[in-house]
Image: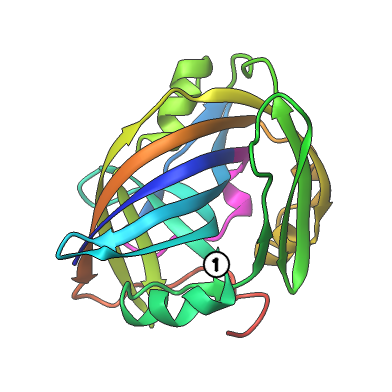
């Protein structure tokens, strides 16, 4: 099932964390890591954006637009393809039944409050999903050299991943995407409330969320993706339990 959309004002916020602090992803996925000395680091990434004109090519007059927030981990699949495992997918409540029935996605309801025109001025981003996530973001200098390398290497590692996996009813479902994205603009992020993040990954100390390792904004990305059937083998699910039912 094929879909086309534009991702508007996609803000990527990422934290390097010890790989041992994260639950192992469902087989056959493995965490995509980098070494910090002798310590393997994995990367927890939030992507907050607006879906604009989400549609199926066969029904181009039916278009949906709404905000979305994904919590995801960079992984490699059994073909060693750079991919992401989406741990949580938050959308407005009215989108949930459509996402589950049509897109077969494990979407959950949330209130998502994003600035109209993110950029140079400090603006608050807020996610309300039983618990709160909030931070202030503004344009800033590129992140320095880290375990992923310099700025271009960091953006490439976090953004340029054409496969996404979700776990639904004990099975992995894959989507394959083609991306046409613009320049990534460096951002500075000051965290305010991390209750929601701490509930999703409780093994990570709350203090670890205080300083993201990398953040950038992509004003516009054209995206076409194909939702694949579930993989035939049941996944060995080793993900954290959802913080809330639904």
Numbered range of the magenta stretch = 13-28
Q: Nearer the viewer, residue 202 or 141?
A: 141
Query: SS of the residue at dot 1?
Result: strand
Residue at left offset 26%, top offset 64%: 61
Q: Is residue 20 magenta?
A: yes
Q: Taking the image as drawn, is residue 69 in sight?
A: yes
* Residue 33 relative to residue 129: left or right: left
Q: Name the image quarter holding the N terminus.
A: bottom left
The part of the image, by quadrant, that contains residue 64 is: bottom left
Q: Taking the image as drawn, is residue 75 in sight?
A: no
Q: Is residue 142 magenta?
A: no
Image spot of residue 99 (x, y percent)? 40, 74
Residue 39 position (above or below residue 228): above
Residue 39 position (above or below residue 177): above
Image spot of residue 184 (x, y percent)? 49, 25
Image spot of residue 80 (x, y percent)? 25, 43
Q: Nearer the viewer, residue 65 or 211?
A: 65
Residue at left offset 40%, top offset 78%: 98
Q: Nearer the viewer, residue 140 or 15?
A: 140
Q: Name the image quarter holding the C terminus.
A: bottom right
Residue of label 1: 91
Q: Nearer the viewer, residue 148 or 57?
A: 57
Residue at left offset 39%, top offset 72%: 105
The part of the image, by quadrant, that contains residue 62 is: bottom left
Residue 38 position (above or below residue 200): above
* Residue 108 relative to residue 202: left or right: left
Crowd tier of the residue under label 1, counting other residues whose Cα lies within 10 Å: few below 14, some 14–19, many 20 or above: many
């Amino acid at each position: 099932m094929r879909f086309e959309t534009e991702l508007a004002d996609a803000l990527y916020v990422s934290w390097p964390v010890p790989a041992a602090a994260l639950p192992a992803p469902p087989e056959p996925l493995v965490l995509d890591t980098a070494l910090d000395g002798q310590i393997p680091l994995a990367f927890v990434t939030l992507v907050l954006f607006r879906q604009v004109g989400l549609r199926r090519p066969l029904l181009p007059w039916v278009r949906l637009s709404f905000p979305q927030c994904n919590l995801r981990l960079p992984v490699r699949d059994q073909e060693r393809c750079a991919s992401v495992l989406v741990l949580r997918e938050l959308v407005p409540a009215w989108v949930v039944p459509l996402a589950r029935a049509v897109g077969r996605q494990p979407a959950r309801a949330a209130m998502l409050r994003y600035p109209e025109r993110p950029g140079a001025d400090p603006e608050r981003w807020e996610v309300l999903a039983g618990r709160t996530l909030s931070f202030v973001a503004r344009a800033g200098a590129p992140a320095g050299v880290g375990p992923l390398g310099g700025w271009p290497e960091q953006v490439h590692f976090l953004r340029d991943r054409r496969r996404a996996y979700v776990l639904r009813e004990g099975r992995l479902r894959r989507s394959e995407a083609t991306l046409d994205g613009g320049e990534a603009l460096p951002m500075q992020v000051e965290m305010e409330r991390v209750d929601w993040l701490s509930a999703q990954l409780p093994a990570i100390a709350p203090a670890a969320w205080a300083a993201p390792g990398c953040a950038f904004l992509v004003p516009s990305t054209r995206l076409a993706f194909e939702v694949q059937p579930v993989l035939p083998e049941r996944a060995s699910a080793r993900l954290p339990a959802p913080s809330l039912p639904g």
